[in-house]
């Protein structure tokens, strides 16, 4: 049997009414109790698995890390950044302070706040530039066969986050020596 090219062949049954088609796709709201219990159990198990995965990620377990954070060189960069203090991690509190200064109705305070904010931003950018160069040099020295592509920006972005907001959590304390 050949089908016409224009698609004029009938499907062999009538098109169902809209209400019948919608009624056939709806799920019954009166699910059996066992199904509800199974769904709740599966939901609880999925929640527990997500919580375990998140805890492993925050601990820094290599298997739980996303691809952007995996590798010995990335671990080294995280530890390198976490072992030092940088002005970038204080940028958010400085912005809060500038906001408070801007609420004072004296223009001198507003101008001083803006000057402080831009000064911290500028110093943070310079710090990030030099930090990026240091990171690449250290990684090249310690891991000669590894690529340094993206490691400088990775380290700079981590250095601009407040310590307690970093993920994975810092493994070394500020000022501590590491290997």
Image: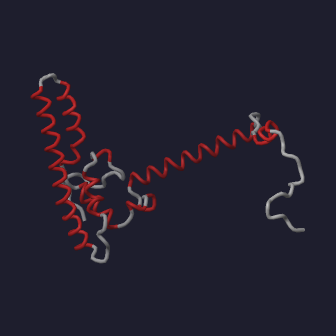
Residue 147 at what x, y percent from top left? 31, 72
**In the visual, does 88 lie left or right of 109?**
right
Residue situated in front as seen by the camera: 25 or 15: 15
Residue 26 picture location, percent across and down: 75, 39
Taking 143 as reference, is 126 left or right? left
Within the image, what quadrant is residue 74 found in?
bottom left
Q: Residue at x 23, y 62 (%)?
A: 178
Q: Residue at x 15, y 22 (%)?
A: 105
Seen as rendered, the residue at the extreme bottom is: 145
Looking at the rendered structure, the number of numbered marks drawn on it comes to 0
Quadrant of image for the C terminus: bottom left
- The residue most toward the left is 108
Question: Can you say whether 137 is above or below 58 in the image?
Answer: below
Q: How is the image coloured?
A: secondary structure
Q: Give percent across and percent down for residue 144.
A: 27, 76
Residue 8 lies in what quarter of the image? bottom right
Image height of 4 relative to 35, above or below: below
Q: Position of residue 36 (x, y in %)?
A: 70, 39
Q: Residue furthest top?
A: 105
Q: Residue at x 76, y 42 (%)?
A: 25
Report the residue that reaches farthest toward the front.
6
Looking at the image, which residue is at 89% across and 54% down?
Answer: 12
In the image, taking residue 49 as reference, residue 39 lies left or right, namely: right
Where, quadrant-wise, is the N terminus in this rendering?
Answer: bottom right
Image-quadrant location for residue 164: top left
Foreground of the two, 97 or 35: 97
């Amino acid at each position: 049997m050949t089908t016409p090219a224009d698609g004029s062949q009938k499907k062999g049954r009538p098109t169902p009414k809209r209400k019948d088609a919608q009624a056939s796709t709806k799920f019954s709201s009166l699910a059996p109790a066992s199904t509800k219990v199974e769904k709740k159990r599966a939901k609880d198990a999925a929640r527990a698995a997500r919580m375990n995965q998140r805890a492993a990620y925050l601990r820094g377990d290599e298997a739980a890390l996303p691809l952007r954070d995996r590798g010995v060189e990335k671990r080294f960069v995280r530890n390198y950044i976490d072992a030092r203090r940088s002005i970038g991690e204080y940028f958010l509190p400085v912005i809060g302070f500038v906001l408070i200064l801007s609420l004072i109705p004296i223009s001198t305070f507003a101008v001083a706040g803006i000057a402080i904010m831009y000064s911290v931003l500028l110093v943070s950018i310079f710090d990030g530039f030099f930090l990026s160069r240091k990171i690449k040099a250290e990684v090249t020295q310690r891991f000669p066969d590894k690529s340094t592509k993206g490691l400088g920006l990775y380290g700079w972005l981590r250095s601009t986050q407040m310590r307690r907001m970093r993920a994975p959590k810092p493994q070394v304390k500020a000022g501590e020596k590491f290997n």
